[in-house]
Image (cartoon, rainbow, N blue to C red):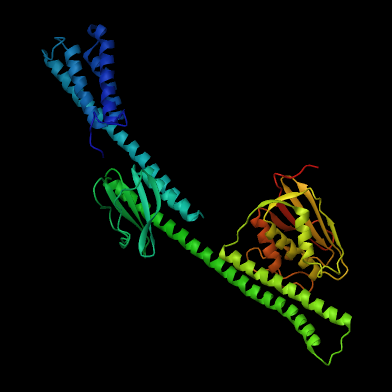
Amino acid sequence: MTGWRPWVTRGGRLVPAAAGLAAAVALTAALAAVLLPVRTHLSGATSALAFVVPVVVGVAIGGFPVGVAAVGIGFLTYDALFIPPYGTLDVSAAQDWVALGVYAAAMLVVARVVAEQRRARAEARQGEDDTRRLFEVSDLLIGDRPLPDLLHRVVETVCQGFGMASVTLLLPEGAQLAVAAQAGTPPPARLPASGSPLPSQGTPLAQIGRGGTRTLPLATADRPVGLLVLTGPALGARDQHRLAIYANHAALAVERARLRESALRGEVLAEVDAWRRTLLGSVAHDLRTPLASIKAAVSDLADPTVRLSTDDRDQLLATVDGETDRLTRLVTNLLDVHRIEAGTLTVSRRPEVLADLVEEALDGLRPQLEGHPVAVDVPSRLLVEVDATLIVQALTNLLDNAARHTPAGTPVRLRAAARAGTVALTVVDDGPGIEAGRVARLFGNGSAPDLSAAPGAIGTGVGLTIARTFVEANGGSLTVDAGLARGLGLLVSLPASPAARAG
């Protein structure tokens, strides 16, 4: 319990002891002023009972020491103003001495009873606060809060719940300690050395330096987790025990959050590994097809025993040229995959005419689209805010997918329209489409693309995944148009340019 310092102020406000004493004095003076004109008509017991009120109020506000002071003030006031001779502290009658003695004894008993009730209420409130804080920790234990949010909650709770000026949480990073969260005023200039080992569980509060700075370990049963650095008033044995319990619960919560993050990282790495294995398999398949075509065409062209007409030679050369372009696009996609994984994909967005981007993508795929009638309905007035290189590559991948995985003679249609703040472009083919159960894995979605479809039914997903990545990097989206009765429709949503022309 904090020592009794009645005249100390905190933040310009009286502490409870001083406030209680002031209230007792004021009430004693007020009661004396009210009773003084009628004192000759009152019995001694009635006058004494009136001064119970300042004692009770003083104890309720400031505690038992204030109650004792209020008894003393009431005793002197009662003697001087209500026991003859008035205006002095002299007592002429023995019964008056008895009255004063009974008053003092009774008031001290009342002060003690009220003080005990006050203490019991304070302990009940403290118990409620302890229960609430432990419930908050339990909520942190069973919740799925991100680690930074959890660490912030821990230091904020300690700072507010224990009246600390500053609370800093240090966590190990390799062989060093680093500040992970902080609450209150700036942390002290002196912190534990970065290379110091973490204390083990059960280590008590240890003082470092001056100014009331102490450390408390956070530890689970098998290893230390972190270190709390606290700056503020000294804590009593009860508060130290509560803080130790809270620290143990907080250590469990932090350890659980870190284990959960490790598990999530493991899942991500497993998905990335599966993606890479599938990517290698699909790339090997895609590489073999154009290489086989190029090899066969070149072999025929180089074989002196094979007599070729001019049309046959031109067709073989066109095959070599087309398959080489296909290999070039595949290698470009592989380089794009590397840029995506390395985080070096840069986006330079500016206003572009969508029709020009579509035309550029079509120009690069004329040989592949030769057997597919292409219908384009893209108004020239539509402007989008995008990186032209990335969007052209994305559209090329979508058109190449439609050309390679639909029967010859089936049309490919492109249509675009303005929507609220966006421009929607749909690439539709009349091929076999895709089953509803395969839509979720069409673009990979962070895992391996769907390779289980029948040959010719749909692409491997590598080009489509890259297309979706490029579209999303420009603030757009790439989804499957579910409103088609047949074929496959891919809906590209791109941000409209603020400089879009009206009409």
Question: Is 12 located above or below residue 398 in the figure?
Answer: above
Q: Position of residue 446 (x, y in %)?
A: 63, 64
- Examine the rendering and report whether any part of residue 95 can be seen: yes
Question: Is 484 located above or below residue 351 in the figure?
Answer: below
Classify residue 480 by image quadrant. bottom right
Q: Position of residue 394 (x, y in %)?
A: 71, 62
Classify residue 272 by image quadrant. bottom right
Assign the C terminus to one quadrant of the image: top right
Q: Residue at x 25, y 45 (%)?
A: 211
The single residue placed furthest to the bottom in the displayed view is 305
**Of residues 241 and 257, the one drawn nearer to the viewer in this rendering:** 257
Question: Disc count in the image?
Answer: 0
**Of residues 103 and 171, the one drawn nearer to the viewer in this rendering:** 171
Q: Position of residue 269 (x, y in %)?
A: 55, 68
Q: Horizontally, is 56 left or right of 327 in the view?
A: left
Q: Residue at x 72, y 50 (%)?
A: 384
Assign the N terminus to one quadrant of the image: top left
